[in-house]
Image (tube, rainbow, N blue to C red):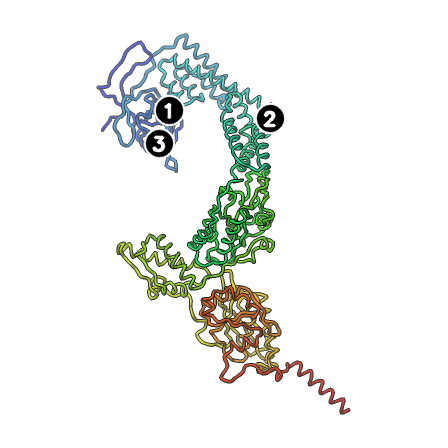
Amino acid sequence: MRIKWGMHNDMFNLTKKDTGDYSLGRRYYYPLLPLRDVVVFPNVVVPLFVGREKSIKALEHAMSQHKEIFLSAQKDAKVDEPAPKDIYVHGTVGTVLQLLKLPDGTVKALIEGKRRGKIENFLHNPEFFMVEVSHSHEQQAADLETEALIRSINAGFQEYAKLNTKISDEIVNTVTSIEDPSRLADTIAGHLALKVQEKQQILETEGLNRRLEKIFEKLRKEINILRVEQRLRARVKKQMEKTQKDYYLNEQMRAIQKEMGTKDDFKAELSELEKKIKRKRLSKEAYARVRQEFKKLKMMSPMSAEATVVRNYIDWILALPWYEKTKDKLDIQEAETILEEDHYGLEKPKERILEYLAVQRLAKKIRGPILCFVGPPGVGKTSLAKSVARATGRNFVRLSLGGVRDEAEIRGHRRTYIGALPGKIIQFLKKAKSNNPVFCLDEVDKMSTDFRGDPSAALLEVLDPEQNYAFNDHYLDLDYDLSQILFITTANNLHGIPLPLQDRMEIIRLPGYTEVEKLNIAKQFLIKKQVEQNGLEPHNIRFSDGAILTIIRNYTREAGVRNLEREISSICRKVAKEVVRNGKDTSVHVKSQSIHKYLGVIKFRYGRTEEKNTVGVTTGLAWTDVGGELLQTEATVMPGKGSLVLTGKLGEVMQESAQAALSYVRSRARQLRLPDNFYEKVDIHIHVPEGAIPKDGPSAGITLATSIVSALTGKPVNRDIAMTGEITLRGRILPIGGLKEKILAAHRGGVNKVLIPMENKKDIEEIPKKILKKVELVLVEHMDEVLTEALIMEDGEELLLPSEECEPFCIREIRQDQDKSSSEITAH
């Protein structure tokens, strides 16, 4: 549609003559700018910030023509895309004085109102609103009534300016100097703090005197409101002379509420809160405290900071499960079935849970046990805690303590601090919604200490059955009963847990899984889980036992099954890609031979400690946070001056074990067929590979001694034997820890025979029978037995000479000196 700008259409060239104040003349066409929360009056210059695309196009169109645009307010400012029905028909024709584009894409326009107008019709234009407007022309001449109204308005505006500090003297002078009544009315209307609807009514009012009367009425109303505000400020200021500015503002709000009589909302909240207090079952101490705090709250202003603190405190007390509890499932058979469904193996913790349920069924009431599951990552400690909750029918909550270093995280902050909250124990009980959940404190060995306190010390009360029936949180400052909670803590090792805290818990060790256990876990749990998570159907993928064992042996080396699950997930993703390419009927059978296709090159060696029997290389066993590990120990001899060189990032205890091992070898030099002064002419270098990893502990003593003897005598060490044990200077072998994990590591590494201290015989019961069938355990008491087992001798050759033929070198020297002296005395 082509429209000639600013020209009238002859078919709308109508003139209406009557005795009214306005006559409708020709109709004109303008782009429309809908306004939000703004009414523009004639003879008023206003800056406008425009961001809507249609509005910007309307402004640009106006600037390209005669710079005239029609301004009309929206009925609802929240409407982003207004329709014609959302826009007032009365508005103002304005001239765009200046248009400035801002960096964020919006436009700043400076517009001056020119004359009133009325939208007669919306014309079709997809880019912006185009409207047909009829101009309104003022025709009433000023009379005595008009003059009286002008004087009253001028006097009222001066009084209004005195009460309203936002009106400057310059504005007052400008307004009072206006002689045109219509312009005066529009200018004062623009400066009054009126709502959009009220300003729109003034804009639409026909007749000069009627409009002046309406403005005078609004002006008197605003003056009365400002006088009330002034009186309220004076009253509040007198009451709060010694208070801070913020508190003064709050009291001003209170005085306004008092003047208007609007406290009904706060009273309704208090009434609802009182009903909650009556319905909630609380301890005697908690009920007395909450009634006391509620009484204080009723006396406070709802806007005061203290009222918010008191209200939050009451809400926390009412939100806690003081006596709400879930009913325990005491059916042992059902609980055992659930535990077996969720986890394979882990007999000891399962047995302990069933014992607890049995005692609970007989005794009816028993304090919740405090169990600590200790084991390497990935063996199922946290998931076992979830299974315990499902088996007992209790709610489950888990709090991770890794990295916690603030005592207030456990006990909470006192209410004197801004933003204070209860500790995590109380917060998670609110989340649990019962006072007898299974509460898992995860990674209890990962807490640390700094200047804010020791969180492990705060846990002493939480985990002490003799004290936790009256746990006192700093925020609540009330005794809360934790004795019904079944606490389960998890840790990778006990070194990070303080001894007093260990004393309060029942330690249950979860060792690493055997190869057979991993195979069953993968078949029963991991494969099903990963098939489902990767969007596959059971018929799309099948794993053979050989394939799973290949993954276990060559692509993972861990005590748990986390990496095993990761590798199975990797295979499932690759199969999922094949299913998408070839269709949903695709079926893949993963065999041992095809594992390389999915997972790439082999990551770990399996079934071989060394390729051949080697001089100076002995296989030891070590315990780590992630289970047992094979530890190769190398020793070599070179010409030198008797130095012992130790490398491989060995700790202080392990270095001392090497010194003790060398001293034992020197004391047994004759039995080992070594020269008496062999150590004076050679240097011995001991190295433990994987030098970037710190290593420490005394259990490598016999391994070090075996490597030294092998290097000095040139006898190779049997590669199918691993060993562990602490050595003394006399060659005695002392017991070590972590035997089960070490034997499992030997089994994973394909070792057939393991030498262990005789005093560790009692620990053999903890080792699975399936492992004992494949790994031979040899109990040894002395280093001589270790050398006999470990070193490979030629047929008929003995490593050690009889002790009576091998008197120690130093004693022999002393006796020779004594015999020589006796001979000289006799001759004399």
Q: Position of residue 1 (x, y in %)?
A: 22, 29
* Image location of residue 69, percent across then percent down: 32, 26
Q: Secondary structure at mark 1?
A: strand
- In this view, the residue in front, 341 or 735, is 341
Residue at left 22%, top 19%?
Answer: 11
| Residue 504 screen position, x and y as percent | 58, 53
Do the residues bearing badges 1 and 2 touch, measured as CB atoms within 8 Å? no
Which circle's residue, 1 or 2, is located before the other in the chain?
A: 1
Label ID, residue 80: 3
The kind of residue tagged 1 is Glu
Graded by Cα atoms within 10 Å as few (under 14), some (14 to 19) or many (20 or more), the crowding at tag 3 reads few
Mark 1 against mark 2, which lies toward the viewer? 2
Q: Is residue 540 above or below residue 246?
A: below
Indicate the quadrant where residue 821 lies.
Answer: bottom right
Numbered label attached to residue 240? 2
341 or 565, which lies in front?
341
For the residue labelled by badge 2, is the local secondary structure a helix, a strand or a loop?
Answer: loop
Left or right of 113 in this view: 813: right
Residue at coordinates 51% horizontally, 40% vertically from top-left? 324
User: Amino acid under label 2?
Assistant: Met
- Position of 673 relative to 329 (above/below): below
For the residue marked with disc 3, what is the amino acid?
A: Asp
**Label 1 to label 3: alpha-carbon separation:** 24 Å
From this viewpoint, which residue is outermost toward the right?
A: 828
Number of the front mark, 1 or 3: 3
- Secondary structure, mark 3, is loop
Q: In the displayed orientation, state which residue is furthest to the top.
A: 144
Residue under pointer 1: 112
How crowded is the residue under tag 1: few (<14 C-alpha within 10 Å), some, or many (20+)? many
